[in-house]
Amino acid sequence: MRILALALVLLAVPFLADAAVFPGTSDTGWSWYDKSECCADAIELAQGDSMFRCERAGGLPSTRFGLRRGNCKFRSNVDGYGARIYRCWGSAKVSCK
């Protein structure tokens, strides 16, 4: 009976990843002088993290139809030279098959 249950679980695992979405996150650190570039980079890093999590789970990231824009949060500060500097955190989800 245990072997049958284990076999059913092993057969179901590939189907569980079929419609999964793996959230990805990122942090750029204090290294940007342009907020839009900082957010774009944070979202791109988060999408890469989401794809990595999908692949690690045995799936295949669907970038053509499953790529979503993502979200960005940021903080700003002034560096030692008086220029505004940004730190961004991104989050994104990529569909996984």
Image: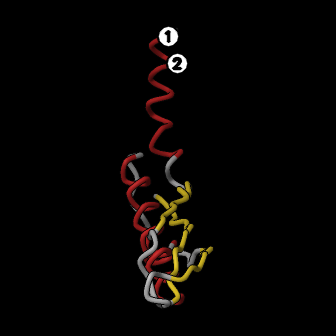
- Given the image, on which type of amino acid does mark 2 rest? Ala
Q: Classify residue 51 as left or right of residue 12.
A: left
- Give how far across and how far down residue 77 sits, in percent: 57, 79
Residue 93 image position (x, y, % from top left): 55, 65
At a point 47% along the width and 38% down the height, the residue shown is 13
Q: Kindly report the distance in space between the C-alpha atoms of the residues bearing marks 1 and 2.
A: 5 Å
Q: Which residue does the image show at 50% across and 75% down from the upper left?
A: 43
Residue 86 located left or right of residue 45: right
Disc 2, SS: helix
- Tell me whether the residue at label 1 lies in contact with that at label 2, contact meaning CB atoms closer than 8 angstroms: yes
In-front residue for pair 82/12: 82
Q: Is residue 79 above or below residue 24?
A: below
Q: Is residue 72 above or below residue 61?
A: below
User: In the image, what residue type sits under mark 1?
Assistant: Arg
Nearer the observer, 96 or 84: 84
**In the image, what residue occupies the spot 50% across and 46% down?**
15
Badge number at residue 5: 2
Q: Is residue 81 above or below residue 30?
A: below
| Observer-nearest of 85 and 22 | 85
The circle drawn on residue 2 is 1
Mark 2 burial class by Cα count in 10 Å: few <14, some 14-19, many 20+: few
Disc sitting over residue 72 in the figure = none
